[in-house]
Amino acid sequence: MKPPKFSYLAPESVKNAIAMKQELGENARYIAGGQSLVPMMNFRVAAPSALIDLNGLTELSKVSLSSDSALNIGALTRTRRLENDPKITGAHPLLAAAARHIAHAQIRNRGTIGGSIAHADPAAELPGIVLACDAEIELQGPRGFRTVHAVDFFESVFTTALEEGELLLNIKFPRWPKDRKWGFQEVSRREGDYALVGIAAWFDLDATSSISACGLSAIGAADTPVRLTKSEAALLGSVPSLPLFEKAAAEVTADIDPFDDVHASAIYRCEVAAALAIRTLTEAWERDT
Amino acid sequence: MSKSYIGKSIRRLEDKRFLTGTGKYIDDVKLPGMASMAILRSPHAHAFITKIDMKSARAMEGVIDVFCANDLEDELPEIPLRLAPFTDFQRFLQKPLANKKVRYVGEPVAVVVAEDRYIAEDALELICLEVEPLPAIVTVQDSLKGETLIHDAAGENIGTQYSVSRGDVEAAFKGAFYTRREHFRTNRHGAVPLETRGLIAEVEPTKPLLRLHGATKVNFFNRRHLAEAFNLPESSVELIETDVGGGFGVRGELYPEDYLVPIASYRSGRPVKWIEDRRENLSATNHSRDITCEMEIAATADGNILGMRASVQGDMGAYIRTNGGVVPSKAAQFLPGPYRVPSFACDVQFLITNKTPVGTFRGPGRFEANFCRERMMDLMADDLNIDPAVLRHRNLLTPEELPYRIGELVPGDPDATLDKGDYPSALDRLLTECRYSDWIDKQDPSDGKLRSMGIACFIESSAAGPPESASITVLSTGDIEVRTGASSVGQGTETGLAQICAEYLDIEIERVEVSHGSTTLVKTGGGTFHSRNTVMAGNATRIAAKKVKEKAKELAALRWNCHPTELTYENGEVCKSPDRFTLQELATFAETRGDILSADAIFDNEKKLSYSYGAHAAQIALDITTGLVKVERYWLTEEIGRALNPAMIQGQAVGGVIQGLGGTFLDHFIYDDDGQLLTGSFADYLLPTSSELPEITAIALENFPSELNPMGFKGAGEGGIVAVAAAVGNAIARALKPYNISINELPLTPDRLREALRGAESLK
Ligand SMILES: Cc1cc2nc3c(=O)[nH]c(=O)nc-3n(C[C@H](O)[C@H](O)[C@H](O)COP(=O)(O)OP(=O)(O)OC[C@H]3O[C@@H](n4cnc5c(N)ncnc54)[C@H](O)[C@@H]3O)c2cc1C
């Protein structure tokens, strides 16, 4: 479990990093926290010829609120900070709650939000949150800057809309209203393991206490995180109640396409995704905001 | 005033170096000129080797040597049988490198020696292994069919089979009011110590010497066989023990690498280091626990057991390794357990499959047997409408019935006898601790979870095998050195033996230093397995200490010109009132005479086993929707005769429970139909972690000191693990009683529980 030989480069700016990548080509990889890439290298599943280390690029770890109250989180922001920094926990409690389910403190201290999203494990928490919350993913590449909406970003297992040489700069979460209801639930074999399946949900209520907007996503339930649009449709315009949540949960299986692995069968994932949807919505509903 | 250490929770002497990072594990050992070794392991479960092309690997810069079986002039030796060496097993022994055929994923095929491990692994990728695949046998059923033979020369895939019995089981079943038959299965898993194996071999070009660092467990047995394999006198082979990060039965047996590393060193003329990485560890180090058990019980209407019969099948993997038939044979022998079972019969089969070979793992066969028997007891309790604790009480052997002959239940083993004890009181103590009579299984309105409690009883033998040695030397500095042939694998042996030495020599424990394991320390040794150390090395240390005292008196008598019988020994000094000599003074005096103040001792328990016993209870909460089980509280009692160090015994019990919870819920070597190991990394092979721990109450009882050794010790290293699956399985089955779900197969995963519930719910 030793990686093959690679060279190491430490760029001084994003521009510099992209130029390096352009020069070294496809076999070079960016490295952030290394918590996914390094194990893959040790198993020789990945064998990059060069690592371009993003860790020195402080410009990538900025967290700020823009004038429209959108929350901007730099790609190099550590997972640990997502759960602890009041700037984030206050502005986006769902993101903070989900982050706590990722691995263990040691790994969260190094792993980054950008790394998790670029890695695109279908069971990973952060991609699920990005998707449920309609985040915009900001990229910089050899051909300039662009923004990709979360729904267009995750293509399949470990595969995203990132093009050759593109660097994830920033994740932009739309404004989070103070009284938004939210919940996050997952099932894993042990604490800190990737989810067998998990559900993220939020909704806003209008003056008549009906659901005016909502977002639901499932992780561990297909080859990408999945937006549960049918369940959302079932919720919109109605007053929250257990029967309503059950109706929405009944739609979950229509949107997901889970797989069998050594930890759980596809049937298990279907069943539990639906059950968790009820729990997550109930958790959201019962939350005092 | 005499110093008392036995029975005290002395802080572990070894912990300071472990906790401050100054322990010396095998990978910390670095020798000048040392090269690094890596092993090409078969990616195929079953195949003929048609070609191994090593040309490009050999040509790589930094590569010193590349070899496969064909490159070796001498025939490779077979890895010997150490335990349960049933006759037919000779046909299935493993050689260190596969020749012509590979039989499991992970089997060594070729070896690279290079300047460092990185280069060695690069070179592995350049070796081209061509094979002609054969069908993989991954179940005992297919193995039995024998359509594909794994070892052609053997003519069958049955390692061996035998039947054992006592009493008239046919008659017992014929007239019985109640009988029940069940099929149980325990999951293939393993010890998976946190420190993987590792070895460094050194050879001397000018004289016959082979030194192997990283050895542990049974060093004198291993030395004998390595000496034979390398055609050296035993005195020319040195096995050196470093600090060890966990043994649990798997570490320190002879494996292919114990031969390959020395061969690599001989060929290259350099010290060679091999450190097993985790990926190798999961397919190269012994697996365990993989048995199925078809079991039947007969009883009266009151639940008094009349007989048991069973057939046990063990999936042995591709070869029979050093531990021979221990796992299935002990599973069979321990099936009747602590109960009055007047008649018992068991057929045992050892089946060869295309998987990693199996060996012993903490509580070998006992964990498995307890699961089957204790689940059966609970099923019977429900069938006969008797409380599970009451049912156990009716059947537990009483103090009056002990010692109790259990008969010859393992071929080749002597007739076995359970020694004295009080099984019912150990159960009663458990029931009091867990407030069994106040407990009610229920669905909790607060969180909707099903909460229930399960109990299980066990017995566990300890301290088998050859005698153990210890030697004590008083140095002229006043320090006391204890050396033993027993090994330390992290369990606190240094502390335990220092306690015994300090107590018997009546000195401060700080003066005692314990060295262990290495064949250079003492002349002989039995080794460390079967919860032996405290019993065997402990008693050897006691005898050595007594002899040192006698020797001290003899030396003092010379100084005083008197007879030793006129002298007394106290407070680490020899006295002839009002004069006294300290041990240090006497050691210095001995030196001036060209002597040393030291004594060697051997303790032999003549292979008589002492049985610890007790009971476990688990309180669980089950989320019926997700199938997730949380063990909320855990209790166990264990009669251990006498506690040397209560804190260390507590640690053994708690650690055992945790490891047992892993085996019950998580640890699982899963193979696919092609014999590929699907749980080959820590992402998929799941170990229990601190996040999953319940509150554990472990109570060591000291009511029945063993009569088989003067200090009264019984082994205490395995009682914590052996009944965990049984107690937890019973608790889960109680929770799911309304659904009539059978909990007969481990591990108890959320997926399995949901699958069973799905079936049950659809019937409703
Ligand atoms: C034991 C363990 C348990 C874990 N459990 C979980 C879990 O429960 N849930 C979970 O979600 N994750 C889990 N992880 C993964 C962890 O969250 C990783 O940190 C994360 O997946 C990757 O982030 P990273 O910063 O470490 O990325 P790296 O490993 O450095 O990189 C991952 C990939 O992303 C690319 N990349 C990184 N940053 C950028 C960027 N800014 N732009 C473009 N590409 C980039 C890299 O080139 C690489 O391909 C676990 C990891 C470990 C070791």
Image (tube, rainbow, N blue to C red):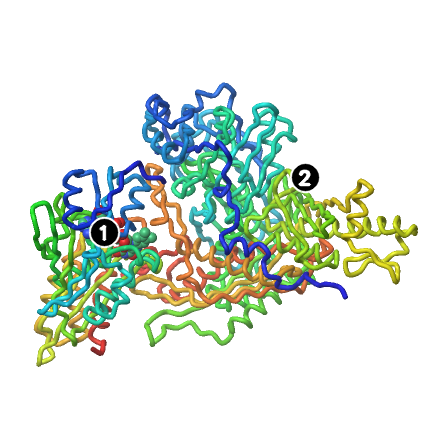
Q: Which mark is drawn over residue B763? A: none
- Label 1 marks a residue whose chain is A
- Label 2 marks a residue whose chain is B
**Residue that numbered label 1 is attached to:** A121
Residue at 18% x, 73% y: name it: A181
Q: Is residue B57 above or below residue A78?
A: above
Quadrant containing the N terminus of chain B in the rendered view: bottom right
Amino acid type indicated by mark 1: Asp
- Element type where label 1 sits in the image: loop
Q: Position of residue B739 (x, y in %)?
A: 35, 64
Q: Quadrant of residue B509?
A: bottom right
Q: How many numbered marks appear?
A: 2
Instruction: Please name whichever residue, B228 or A76, is drawn nearer the observer in this view of the structure.
Output: A76
Amino acid type indicated by mark 2: Thr
Q: Residue furthest bottom?
A: A207
Apparent side of residue B586 relative to residue B613 in the rendered image (left or right): right
Q: Position of residue B383 (x, y in %)?
A: 46, 63
**Residue that numbered label 2 is attached to:** B524
Instruction: Please name whichever residue, B150 or B546, is drawn nearer the observer in this view of the structure.
Output: B546
- Label 2 crowd bin: few (<14), some (14–19), many (20+), radius 10 Å: many
Q: Position of residue A198 (x, y in %)?
A: 24, 60
Q: Is residue B757 above or below residue B106?
A: below
